[in-house]
Image (cartoon, rainbow, N blue to C red):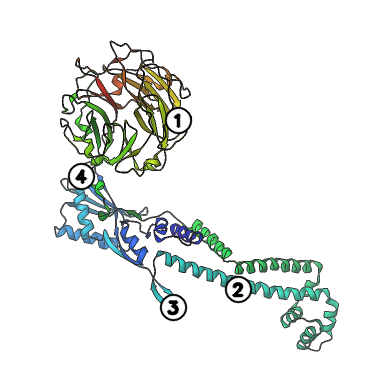
Amino acid sequence: LGEVIDGIIRLIDQPDISIEELNRIIKGPDFPTGALILGHEGIRRAYQTGKGSITLRARTQIETLQNGRNRIVVTELPYGVNKAKLIERIAELHRDRKIDGITDLRDESDRSGLRIAIELRRDANPHVILNQLFKYTALQQNFGIIMLALVENRPRLLNLKQMLHYYLQHQLEVIVRRTQFDLQKALDRAHILEGLLKALDIIDEVINTIRSSPTTDEARSRLMSNFGFTEVQAQHILDMQLRRLTALEREKLQEEYDELQDRIAYYRAVLASEKMQYDIIKQELGEIKKKYGDPRRTRITADDGDIDIEDLIADEDVVVTISHTGYIKRVPLSTYRQQRRGGRGVQGAGTKEEDFIEHIFTTTTHHDMMFFTDQGRVYRIRCHEIPEASRQARGTAIVNLIPLLPGEKVNTVIPVKEGDQEEGYIFFATRTGWVKKTAVTEFQNVRSTGIIAIKLEEGDTLVGARLTRGNDEIILVSSAGYALRFHEDDVRPMGRDTRGVKGITLGPDEYVVGMDGVVPGADLLVVSETGVGKRTPLTEYPTYKRGARGVITIQLLPERHGRLVGVKAVTEGNDLMLVSEQGVLIRIPVEEVRRSGRNTQGVQLMNLDANDRVSAVAQVVTRDEE
């Protein structure tokens, strides 16, 4: 009811609205028994043409019992399905062995609602049996829609907009007729009151005329001829009670007359204004919605025919790696087992001798992937479009997935979820210390050939990009071990093809190695190229304005640490993934890295061969086994 009222009000405000837009407001039929409507196509066809068919399916859930068996529970049935006959049908199918695996069938419905419990054998697949029940019983059935109505006494098939239009025309007619009736009633009463008020002004002459008349008819005639009263007025004067002669009664008559004049003026205004008539309809519909509107009971879900390729791909955590020479692959996260700090790791990719793993991150197969390159361009593909490979495989050349320009290398990859399309920003940082933020909506329609994400000066490269909400804090870390924390508000939103503003002050031969967001309760973890790392609470980093030098985050000794290569904001419960230039990977829990102050040297996180160096650090968000 609420959706239909909203649709009618929108049609009043926007007469040229399309059926598609109305369909977004009026989602579809809503049945008193709830259940599910499978797919949108049947509803769309019915609303477009006036005729269609939808598939209704019972609302069910699969419960696992303590003994390890499964139970199918039905809590809502399609409209018009008889519960007793349904249970008989399920029992019949079990007896005839058309459905095998049911051990018990009970009606557990009570005053709290419908509930049918179907218990299964331990070896029975509940999903298979549920699909069989949908196929052979009324747990799933088609429901025909025909939007037939009498228009000017002729039956017509109407689409959604026409149906609402003729309903509105009917309501306008009701409003006009009702107002005309109320107006005439008010005019008639006002006419009588005019006569009574006039008679009170000349009451002595009126009384003398009535007393001197031999009959009532004669008195009526004399009142009409002598004083100009109409027949109706004269009759009401004759019927008037003596108490009407008091001053108080006369005042009441005058008040009633004045009120009637206001109502008559309002009725005439309504009849003269279509806008006022529509406003009355909107007001009355709003009151109906407030009094009778309730939440939708029937949920509209995807049909088997509405399933796209993503529904056929498991939503699983994966590790995506990109090598220095541009080979990409995805591997299930479960491939990498946890190891303790200082372990040797496992061989992660069979790269060529001159190649090494340069980028690694974790995501899921259902996310969009935005690839930002060192030249400031962005490309966009689905994660499941990245070919899956074994842990030892080299992967696929990234140029087979995205058309990189000559010499262009992927720098950052951001998984984008559905909700990220609406709001938020992409925050950029470059090697020379420049920063910028651009609304995510600027990257919704990325051409297959890529688009510019940030304008770079000659010699500069993009070192990081991340999603922000507009009110985050950012921390930049330089190769010399300095960290600068500042508020995102210090950087105003800019378009794609802009350079940005100065983010951090750097010393000679110093450059930005990474950027991350400040998370409450998190630590800043930094890793040097020799595998030494440390984590320090972010609360130890004061907030400065952008463009400052920052504070020391690790005490670097050239012979032990080299330069910093990675930075991450981490929390306990997460795991870290370190990868070396020779393709060795190690996964360690954050808890294995003890907290220490900013001005300390850190501990050895990964043991490396003499000619090997850490090339990338990624954070793994672990999930509960369930």
**Place of residue 2 in the rendered image (x, y in percent of width and height, measured from the top left):** 45, 57
Label 3: how many residues lie within 10 Å, few (<14), some (14-19) or many (20+)?
few
Q: Specify the label residue 69 is tagged with.
A: 4
Locate the N terminus and report the quarter of the image it occupies: bottom left
Q: Quadrant of residue 238?
A: bottom right
Q: Specify the label residue 100 is tagged with.
A: none
User: Do the CB atoms of the residues marked 2 and 4 lie less than 8 Å apart?
Assistant: no
User: Do the CB atoms of the residues marked 1 and 4 lie less than 8 Å apart?
Assistant: no
User: Do the CB atoms of the residues marked 2 and 3 lie less than 8 Å apart?
Assistant: no
- Please identify, in this view, whether the residue under mark 2 or under mark 3 is nearer the observer: 3
Report which residue position mark 2 lands on: 181
As drawn, which residue projects farthest toward the front?
Answer: 458
Tag 3's secondary structure?
Answer: loop
Circle nearer the N terminus (1, 2): 2
- Look at label 2 and name its amino acid: Phe
- Look at label 3 and name its amino acid: Asn
User: In this rendering, would 102 be left or right of 146?
Assistant: left
Q: Compared to 555, does 157 lie above or below?
A: below
Residue at the (40%, 22%) spot, across then down:
538
Report which residue position mark 1 lands on: 488
Tag 4's secondary structure?
Answer: loop
**Place of residue 220 in the rendered image (x, y in percent of width and height, measured from the top left):** 76, 85
